[in-house]
Image: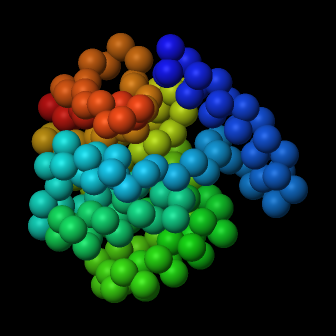
Amino acid sequence: MMSNVKNWLIALFVGICTGAYAQENLALDVPYVPTNQETVEEMLKLAGVKPGDVVYDLGCGDGRIVITAAKKFGATGVGVDLNPQRLKEANENAQAAGVTDKVKFVKGDLFDFDFSEANVVTMYLLPSVNLKLRPKLQKELKPGSRIVSHDFDMGDWEAKKTVEVGNDTIYLWTID
């Protein structure tokens, strides 16, 4: 029930945001909805993020996931987003957190971006976007790479593990 309400709210938000983004001439598939910090940390724990890992956050928003991966888990990270305002915020947040040597934020289209350097990919996208990205991730990521999604699965690709954090669901897959 809660999942249906959340999906409805996100769909409503997408509709509202689409108008605002259209004014900025941005073709975004997903609205900016920040992940709360408790869920961010659980996502990174579930993925087993450790020093030496390279975390890519798809649709990085304000950068909180890769910043946390660097600051608390010792990883490096790349945040990818299309929205220049979010990228500006992400860079400012990385500066404030003192991790600009460990993270970078890139303007890029997820469907054209190369994920082959990542060994952890995080995302809070919509189900349709997850499904569209799934074959690209499976093709580009090395065996053993982990994918973590906040709230949305990848269709018939069964998650290795699923964790509940408050009203959030986190899914984990590993590339074979």
From the viewer's perspective, is residue 78 above or below residue 168? Answer: below
Relative image position of residue 46 (x, y in whole percent): 19, 42
Residue furthest front in the image: 166
Residue 91 drawn above or below residue 160 = below
Against 137, is 11 above or below? above
- The correct choice, above or below, for 123 with respect to 41 in the image is above
Q: Nearer the viewer, residue 82 or 11?
A: 11
Q: Nearer the viewer, residue 44 or 117?
A: 44
Image-quadrant location for residue 29: top right
Find residue 6 and report its horizontal and vertical position in percent: 56, 28
Coloring applied to the structure: rainbow
The quadrant holding residue 13 is top right
Left or right of 33 on screen, residue 49: left
Q: How many marks?
A: 0
Residue 110, x across and y down, in percent: 51, 49
Q: Residue at x 28, y 53 (%)?
A: 41
Residue 163, percent across and down? 25, 31
Q: Is residue 157 left or right of residue 57?
A: left
At a point 48% along the width and 58% down the height, the residue shown is 60
The residue located at (42%, 78%) in the rendering is 94
**Left or right: residue 149 compared with residue 22:** left
Q: Is residue 136 visible?
A: no
Q: Which residue is at the front of the view, 115 or 174?
A: 174
Is residue 87 visible in the rendered image? The answer is: yes
State the quadrant of the C terminus.
Answer: top left
The residue that appears at 20% across and 27% down in the rendered structure is 161
Report the side of 98 relative to 26 (left or right).
left
